[in-house]
Image: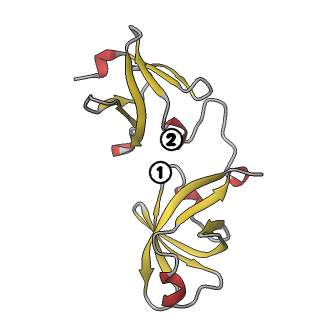
Amino acid sequence: MSHLRTIGQIVRPKGLKGEVWAQAVPDYDHLFREGSRVLVQGLSLKVESAKPYGRRFLLKFEGLCSLEQAEKLRGGTLLVHEEDLPSLQEGEFFSSDLVGIRAFDTQGRYFGTVDRVMKPHNLDILVVQDEGRDEVLIPLIDTYVHKLSIEERLVVFDPACLP
């Protein structure tokens, strides 16, 4: 059985003809295009049209043609089968794969786990959270990140990147 990956969420309907506003998860914007297949609330839907507006998309699905049908999708999670994701080159990964990995500095001190990945101005920043601590922000650049292993669920960073 294939695994599903979250690529976005239906925010709300738009207009009377079944269009919806959707919020994309970073790294998956390219999957919001004509002809893509997604799962929403147990329904397999084919994207008829997708118009980008920043991180949001105005989507029209084949067979959805009324406000009432679109309203039923409100808040629904957009999913795709993992085998339908594009192949990655060696060393590449999806940002969502980083959520939950453990973060250590080069001295071996544990800082917590990656809670999310922020993407301001084309720079990925790992947001690390641990109970009782404030968030720690780690820029995902070679200068500061000495090791990043999806398989080991581990990131090792230079503490010089911290304020």
Residue shown at 25%/31% (left/top)?
134
Q: Amino acid at mark 2?
A: Ser
Q: Is residue 108 above or below residue 38?
A: above
- Find the distance from the CA under tag 1 to the CA under tag 2: 7 Å
Q: Quadrant of residue 149?
A: top right
User: In the image as oriented, which residue stretches furthest toward the left?
Assistant: 163
Q: Quadrant of the C terminus?
A: top left
Give whichever of 52, 118 is nearer the camera: 118
Identify residue for label 1.
Answer: 26
Say left or right for 44 vs 53. Answer: right
Q: Residues within 10 Å of mark 1 (few under 14, many from 20)?
A: some
Q: Is residue 22 above or below residue 131?
A: below
Say left or right for 65 vs 134. Answer: right
Q: Amino acid at mark 1?
A: Pro
Q: Secondary structure at mark 2?
A: helix
First in sequence: mark 1 vs mark 2 = 1
Residue shown at 42%/76% (left/top)?
12
Query: Residue 92 location in percent, x, y?
Result: 60, 35
Query: Residue 101 location in percent, x, y?
Result: 50, 30
Q: Secondary structure at mark 1?
A: loop
Residue shown at 47%/51% (left/top)?
26
Q: Are marks 1 and 2 in contact (CB under 8 Å)?
A: yes
Query: Residue 31 location in percent, x, y?
Result: 59, 59
Say left or right for 53 vs 162. Answer: right
Q: Quadrant of residue 38?
A: bottom right
Identify residue for label 2.
Answer: 95
Query: Residue 98 location in percent, x, y?
Result: 50, 35
Give whichever of 143, 72 is nearer the camera: 72
Residue shown at 42%/27% (left/top)?
141
User: In the image as oriented, which residue stretches furthest toward the right?
Assistant: 1
Q: Is residue 156 above or below residue 35?
A: above
